[in-house]
Image (cartoon, rainbow, N blue to C red):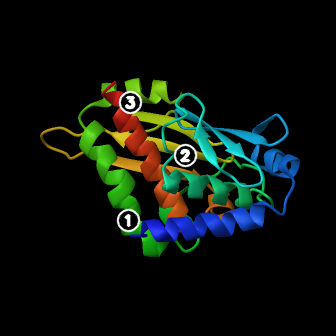
């Protein structure tokens, strides 16, 4: 498990890379809007962040005093870097294991994303439907309930759930567009899946 110092260093390295680029170039490749001469406006799940250029300081658009988690900052910065040469989205979806290099992080992916999804929604399909609507999930024809989300414009995820009962346990899967490994590292992909699941859990209680 990375320490906070690891994330701080990762952010520093990312800022060094991104500050050498133009704001227009970053916004176009990542598919984000700019605000004024030095701000990126970044929707992320059910939050919107304003990110300054070239120092990449994050501020929550609706709660300015609320600290943006460093893990989310790093994921977003890595996304900004990764989209510079990423291919267009395809119609092909892959399991996490199919992302190059993901085998090493598979247990972390299951622990962060798949297991919590099953635990909270495995016998509560209605709760997932309610939560998905709050995160702009688009229903797909898969499992007992399936939704497609866009936590970041070029990193869509599909969440699929098969409801459990007294005889059979619930099952779940999270699929990635097959360009995911071109944009995010396997560790980042596991993190963003977990962030989506925990945000679904959070809004399901609201």
First along the sequence among labels 2 and 1:
1
Taking the image as shown, residue 132 lies to the left or right of residue 60, namely left
Residue 77 picture location, percent across and down: 65, 56
Q: Which label sits in the foreground, 2 or 1?
A: 1
Viewer-nearest residue: 57 or 135: 57
Q: Which quadrant of the view contains residue 184?
A: bottom right
Q: Report the residue marked by disc 2.
A: 157
Mark 3 and mark 2 lie on one chain; the one further toward the N terminus is 2
Tag 1 secondary structure: helix
Which residue is the extreme one toward the front? 65
Instruction: Choose mark 3 or mark 2, whichever is in front.
Output: 3
As measured in the structure, the alpha-carbon distance from the residue carrying label 3 to the one carrying label 1 is 23 Å
Q: Which residue is mark 3?
A: 203
Q: Which quadrant is home to the C terminus?
A: top left
206 horizontally vs 52: left or right: left
Residue 138 vertical position relative to residue 95 in the rendered view, above or below: above
Residue appearing at x 72%, y 55% in the figure: 55
Residue shown at 41% from the left, 50% from the top: 173
How crowded pointer 3 is (Cα within 10 Å; few <14, some 14-19, many 20+) is rated as some
Label 2 packing within 10 angstroms: few (<14), some (14-19), many (20+): many
| Residue of label 1 | 108
Rendered location of residue 66, percent (x, y): 48, 38
Give the quarter of the image for residue 79: bottom right
Marks 2 and 1, how far apart at CA: 17 Å
Q: Is residue 163 visible?
A: no
Task: Identify the element where label 2 is drawn.
Answer: strand
Towards the viewer: 108 or 126: 108
When the figure is inspected, residue 54 is found, relative to residue 117, above or below; the finding is below
Give the mark nearest the N terminus, 3 or 1: 1
- Residue, x 47% and y 59% (percent of image)? 190
């Amino acid at each position: 498990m990375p320490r906070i110092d690891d994330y701080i260093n990762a952010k520093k390295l990312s800022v060094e890379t991104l500050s050498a680029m133009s704001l227009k170039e970053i916004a176009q490749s990542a598919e984000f809007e700019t605000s004024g001469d030095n701000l990126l406006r970044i929707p992320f799940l059910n939050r919107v962040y304003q990110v300054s250029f070239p120092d990449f300081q994050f501020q929550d658009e609706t709660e300015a005093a609320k600290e943006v988690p460093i893990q989310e900052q790093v994921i977003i910065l890595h996304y900004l870097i990764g989209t510079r040469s990423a291919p267009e989205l395809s119609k092909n979806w892959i399991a996490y294991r199919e992302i190059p290099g993901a085998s090493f992080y598979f247990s972390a992916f299951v622990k962060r994303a798949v297991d919590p999804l099953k635990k909270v929604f495995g016998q509560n399909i209605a709760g997932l439907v309610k939560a998905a609507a709050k995160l702009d999930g688009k229903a797909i024809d898969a499992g007992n309930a399936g939704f497609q989300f866009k936590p970041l414009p070029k990193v869509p995820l599909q969440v699929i759930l098969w409801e459990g009962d007294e005889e059979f346990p619930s099952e779940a899967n999270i699929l990635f567009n097959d360009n995911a490994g071109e944009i995010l590292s396997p560790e980042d992909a596991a993190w963003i899946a977990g962030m989506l699941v925990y945000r679904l859990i959070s809004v399901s209680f609201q």
